[in-house]
Amino acid sequence: MLSSFYRPQNEYCIAVSGGAEPMFKLIMGEVDQCFSNIRVLNRPRIDWGSYEIINSTFACLNVLSSSETPWKYFQYLAGVDIPLKTNLEMVEILKQWNDTVNAEITWFQPKRIRSKRIEAAPLPLYKASLSATVPRAAIDEIVQSSEARSLLYFLLNTSIPDESFWGTLTGNADKFPVPGGTDAAKWLEYRERYRKNHSEQLKSFEKQKYRMRYYLSRYQLWDTNCRGKMASGSCIFGISDLPDLLKQPHLVAHKLYIDFEPAAFFCGLKEIRSRERKPLELDVKPYKEIPQVELSMGIPFENLSHPLWLF
């Protein structure tokens, strides 16, 4: 995965699980020594849904925030992600986002806090995938804030704590106004009203195969349109999924496994490499029209260019 995303001008932080194979740890240690722009952190064991996922992510945020390299955006990547855009295309897209956060915005499910009291949370909680794209100014604010550390402490022993991180820290514009963040409560309330009044348009929109929407950091398929195989509720993309994947407007796709139809990964990467040598003309205008970008420019919800992209 690293080779598919690596560029010498970027900064990288890789959290290696304490449960990883010794040979993998050795190799990653050599990567850390050989590349000045890659930091490898040896962390406690990291399992799916465990607290250590967000704890290790926060450790990497601290490392990257202290870097003197003038990087502009943080992008969270998992080991089974594949790029859907070239590095240049991603840069052009990020320019359109105008230093706004690109993260999921969904209601928090109270059952996730288990035995804790939701009133004890340092901020109103929102749910979002850990896969997000966040401007540096927001990262710098987050790593220096007491609110972020209080949230980390509160999320200990909750269910899938990594999904309570970005939505909460970047969705409380009134209580914790990080640069590029949103008011998740207003967003979700408007979205529900719009859904009630435009149900037919929404049904038609959701049938579109390659639709633009507000959340473009990661493409992940949760339904039976998967041509590969389903695991833990989402699609492991196979070779038959590739033509559709490469037409999606998202930055990366999740998930492709090297031990399941590996041709999907390598053929996808080959196409991206080909586009680097012979760039396609990418229409970046729609990326500037996604809701959070327009909202950051002072445009009210009622005047958004594409209200269906709120979904």
Image (cartoon, rainbow, N blue to C red):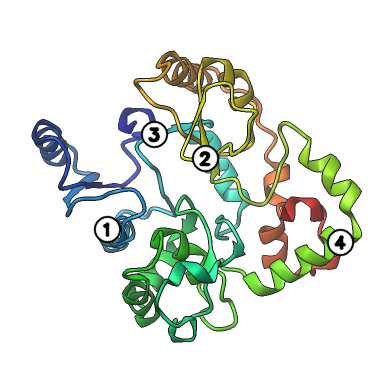
Does 289 sit left or right of 182 as displayed? right
Describe the element under mark 1 as helix, strand or loop: helix
Tell me the distance, in whole angstroms, between the alpha carbons under discs 3 and 1: 18 Å
Tell me the distance, in whole angstroms, between the alpha carbons under discs 1 and 4: 39 Å
Q: Nearer the viewer, residue 229 or 13?
A: 229
* Circle nearer the viewer, 2 or 3: 2
Percent position of residue 159, x then y: 40, 63
Give the residue type at disc 4: Lys
Give the residue type at disc 2: Gly
- The label on residue 196 is 4
Look at mark 2 in the image and give the residue it sits on. Answer: 233
Task: Give neighbour class at mark 2: few <14, some 14-19, many 20+ (Cα, 10 Å).
Answer: few
Is residue 205 visible in the rendered structure shown here? Answer: yes
Q: Farthest residue toward the bottom? A: 119
- The label on residue 52 is 1
Look at mark 3 in the image and give the residue it sits on. Answer: 80
Percent position of residue 92, x then y: 57, 41
Vertical arrangement, residue 40 with respect to residue 225, above or below: below
Give the residue type at disc 3: Val
Mark before the other along the chain sequence, 1 or 4: 1
Tell me the distance, in whole angstroms, between the alpha carbons under discs 2 and 1: 22 Å
Mark before the other along the chain sequence, 2 or 1: 1
